[in-house]
Image (tube, rainbow, N blue to C red):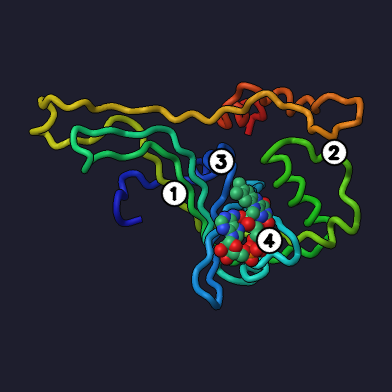
Amino acid sequence: MRRGAGRARYAKEDVLSILDAGLIAHVGVSTSDGPLVLPMAYGHDGECLFLHGAVANHLLGTGAGQEVCVTVTCLDGLVMARTPFHNSMNYRSALIRGTARRVDEDERKGYALKLVTDHVVENWDSGRPPSPSDLRKTLVLEVPLTEASAKIRNGDPVDEPQDIAGPWWAGVVPVVTRFGSPFASADLTADSSPPNPVIALSGLTPEERCNRKGG
Ligand SMILES: Cc1cc2nc3c(=O)[nH]c(=O)nc-3n(C[C@H](O)[C@H](O)[C@H](O)COP(=O)(O)OP(=O)(O)OC[C@H]3O[C@@H](n4cnc5c(N)ncnc54)[C@H](O)[C@@H]3O)c2cc1C
């Protein structure tokens, strides 16, 4: 990392803690029509990041066997400086680059899909198990976490020394993501409650959810 290198972290724990707390990955690939970046769910096991989609998925199909770039960002605050020129954001951001491998082995595919599912909401074991046809229709890619960096900004704005005593307000507006209470689907006929891990999410931030999982 060249610009803002003081905020760069290459420690794997930093990258993994951002992947744990994040919910959306922005996945970038080079296509014959130019670059394409799309938001996606993801999972990881500390060694690889996993992505999934339909077998017809254009981005994943193009990315298989290619160099891809994946970013995950957690927004923590809007940083307001004395001059808008120094406004910023508090954030934790991870970037992974690597060659995406298409996962075709059934066992590894099931392993990856459980990780992606449970990273978003833990219900792989409480929902209907996937059928062989579900698995055939799903494309899974894995990207090694060997080339990864994290960038983290927190704290106050950084103003010009001569502006500090000025009349302008400076500070931080926190941004907090929190899970709400689950509500049943309008067509729910099963006489069942949400699974316990889903009920337990209510009121938590993604970071609090990681701490509860111990991950
Ligand atoms: C929070 C979130 C999570 C998601 N998780 C997944 C996931 O885990 N797996 C998955 O397969 N898909 C996921 N999606 C949908 C994903 O972003 C793509 O829309 C989808 O994968 C289709 O990709 P494709 O390359 O086949 O698109 P195509 O159908 O080939 O797209 C054609 C064109 O449509 C436009 N387009 C496609 N997707 C988007 C988009 N999201 N926003 C704006 N324009 C778009 C672009 O111009 C694109 O070139 C998620 C979307 C969101 C917002």
Image marks 2 and 3: residues in contact by CB distance under 8 Å: no
Give the amino acid type for the residue marked by disc 2 in the picture.
Gly
Secondary structure type for disc 1: loop
Residue placed most toward the observer, 152 or 31: 31
Secondary structure type for disc 2: loop
Residues at marks 3 and 4, CA–CA distance in whole angstroms: 19 Å
The circle on residue 22 is 3
Give the amino acid type for the residue marked by disc 4 in the picture.
Leu
The circle on residue 10 is 1
Q: Which residue is mark 4?
A: 141
> Most extreme residue toward the front, as rendered?
186
Residues at marks 2 and 3, CA–CA distance in whole angstroms: 23 Å
Q: Earlier in the sequence, mark 1 or mark 4?
A: 1
Q: Which residue is mark 2?
A: 127
Residues at marks 1 and 2, CA–CA distance in whole angstroms: 37 Å
The picture places residue 109, in percent across and down from the top left corner, at 78, 56
Which callout, 1 or 2, points to the residue nearer the camera? 2
User: Which quadrant would residue 137 be assigned to in this image?
Assistant: bottom right
Left or right relative to 108: residue 47: left
> Residue at position x 80%, y 32% from top?
186
Residues at marks 3 and 1, CA–CA distance in whole angstroms: 18 Å
